[in-house]
Amino acid sequence: MHRDHDPAAPAAEQVSFDDFLKVDIRVGTIVAAEVYDGARKPSLKLRIDFGPGIGERKSVGQVAALYTPEELIGRQVAAVVNFPARQIGKALSQALTLGFADEEGRVVLFAPDSRVPDGSRLF
């Protein structure tokens, strides 16, 4: 899934600002979370509310190493909402929840440090 999470890796090739604008990154609130037992890596199935313009989307994230389903309910996260849905095992992921790898390669979720309206777009 990830090409390279080495913090010392050089920057990827340049893209235009118009290309950046094509990637729709929104904030949403996790309204449901459960362990995804069929995953190869510790994962959770999330249901995220992106507000009235987008609604709820399902996402599968390799975040179970650091997070329990209970602690994620009500938490805001950032996700790409305009990638095609992707089948991950028996689950369908409709949004790519964003995070960064820590020193051990575990996913740390990317989120605003203050509450913002669900559906707000990253700029």
Image (cartoon, helix red, strand yellow):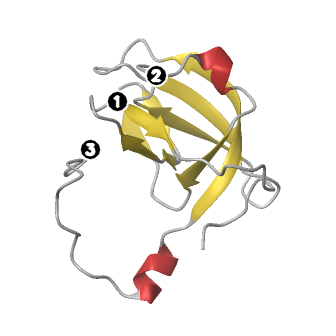
Q: Amino acid at mark 1?
A: Arg
Q: Which mark is residue 66?
A: 2
Q: Residue at x 66, y 66 (%)?
A: 121
Q: Is the residue 92 above or below the residue 80 in the image?
A: above
> Rounded to the nearest whole Å, what is the CA distance between mark 2 and mark 1?
7 Å
Q: Quadrant of the N terminus?
A: top left
Answer left or right for 116 relative to 97. right
Q: What number is the disc on residue 106? A: 1
Q: Mark 2 or mark 3: which comes first in sequence?
A: 3
Report which residue position mark 3 lands on: 1
Q: Residues within 10 Å of mark 3 (few under 14, many from 20)?
A: few
Residue appearing at x 45%, y 56% in the figure: 84
Where residue 21 is drawn, which disc sits there? none
Residue 4: percent from the left, percent from the top? 19, 51
Q: Pinpoint residue 57: horizontal percent, then vertical percent.
A: 63, 43
- Comparing 51 with 109, the one in front is 109
- Residue found at x 17% / y 66%: 10
Mark toward the start of the polypeptide (2 vs 1): 2
* SS for callout 3: loop
Task: Tell me which residue sits at (52%, 21%) in the image.
Answer: 67
Q: Name the element at disc 1.
A: loop
C-alpha span from label 3 to label 1: 13 Å
Q: Nearer the viewer, mark 2 or mark 3?
A: 2
The residues bearing labels 2 and 3 have C-alpha atoms spaced at a distance of: 18 Å
For the residues labelled 2 and 3, say whether their Cβ atoms are less than 8 Å apart: no
Which residue in the rendered view is the most extreme toward the top?
37
Dot 1: few (<14), some (14–19), or many (≥20) neighbours within 10 Å?
some
Indicate the amino acid at tag 2: Leu
Callout count: 3
Residue placed most toward the observer, 53 or 69: 69
